Image: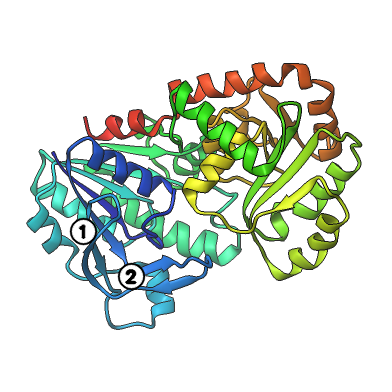
Amino acid sequence: MRTVHVCLCGPYSDGFAYQENELVAQHVAMGHEVSVLATTETYGADRKLMHMAAGETGTKDGARLIRLPYRQGAPRSVMGKLRMHPDVFEWLEKLAPDVILFHGLCSWELLTVARYKRQHPATLLYADCHEDFNNSARTWSSKWLLHFAYYRSVLKRCLPWIDKVLCVTVESISFARDFYGVDPALLELYPLGGEVMDDETYKAKRIAMRRQLRVDDSSIVFVQSGKLDVSKQLPQALRAFASVVDSRLRYVIAGQMTPDVLAEGQPLIDADARVCYLGWVKPDALRDLLCAADCYVQPFGQTATTQMSLCCRCAIIVQDLPSHRALFFDNGFLTNEKQRLAVAFQYMVDHADRLEAMRAASGEFARVNLDYRMLAQRVCS
């Protein structure tokens, strides 16, 4: 089956563990003929935005990768919002896909892909929705000029030719339904996922990484990861962790701190021997680290690593949000203004005898709901 992933709503970073990377990898592994239409924007190893040359290469998983420049006629900063690219229709004609997955709802080129679908009605067209009010439309101009007047108008014109709008969270469903005006019958929950391992693989990774971290079976390992800016509340988490006195606890940080967070966080790391800062780690190493962990910590906001942590059988301490409630079933702790992080850490200590059951529950939920092999088959079976 010929499958095209259209990644024109933001950077495409080959070799990362984002949804588009994982689905491309799974579709290649399933034996499909996979192509990616992407922008020239990508994230470098330092997590800073950079630009690649336009043209055709390949992904590390073996898919065909075609990077398209922005159209001429406006500065790149403007085109980065309008998201207009040349030759999208011509490439679709060459690739002749059976299935198209358009990643995101915020691009002029959704009109181009809808036009292709209109002329080739046998092609299945899915568009996924990552947008919600936590990560999009957060200022007046962004909400009413960019998202409502522009992106919403583009999407509404395309809806007759979209087979399903696949929303990654319950907040995304609300955003697409209530703000973009998508018919609820067209919406489907399509969560971010992860790699679900068999018992033998999981145990081998857990043993090897815990040995590398120099922790024994009695240790309770917490992990926080990602791009650690002020909003992620790492210093607050470290202070809360420090308030719980227990020699069994370990706090492992895998990510890149912004300078202001580093200035506040480094003294807290230095002051507690139970804390380990690894810096930025590659996706495979992060997956191994999550296998070694007992609990994943996301004090504020959302990240795809939360779903990945469930796939690696972690209990969770996460902010009380609708999307997190959908992942929560007595397998950790939801934090809010009244129940702060120190209470959450103490809860894990007090319920250490139940951690195994919490982690097993996360793993079973992931096996049924979050396995990228299953999610890939949903759009390309």
Secondary structure beneath disc 2? Answer: loop
Report the amino acid beneath label 1: Thr
Left or right of 115, for residue 231: right
Left or right of 319, for residue 89: left
Q: Is residue 106 above or below residue 219?
A: below
* Residue 242 numbered tag: none
> Which residue is at 45% across, 43% downward?
176
Q: Nearer the viewer, residue 280 or 72?
A: 280
Task: Look at discs 2 and 1 and give the one toward the viewer.
Answer: 2
Mark 2 and mark 1: Cα distance apart in space = 18 Å
Report which quarter residue 368 is drawn in.
top left
> Which residue is at 75% across, 43% downward?
251
Secondary structure beneath disc 1? Answer: helix
Left or right of 199, for residue 334: right
Mark 1, residue position:
112
Neighbourhood count class around disc 2 (C-alpha, 10 Å): few under 14, some 14–19, many 20 upward: many
Left or right of 152, for residue 317: right
Mark 2, residue position:
40
Q: Is residue 110 above or below residue 304?
A: below
Tell me residue 140's x, y (percent).
Answer: 59, 63
Q: Quadrant of the N terminus?
A: top left
Report which quarter residue 56 is drawn in.
bottom left
Q: Earlier in the sequence, mark 2 or mark 1?
A: 2
Confirm whether residue 292 shows in the render.
Answer: yes
> Which residue is at 16% across, 54% downward?
115
Q: Quadrant of the C terminus?
A: top left
Report the amino acid beneath label 2: Thr
Q: Nearer the viewer, residue 86 or 346?
A: 346
Confirm whether residue 323 shows in the render.
Answer: no
Report which quarter residue 122 is drawn in.
top left
Q: Is residue 377 above or below residue 72?
A: above
Q: Nearer the viewer, residue 341 or 146?
A: 341
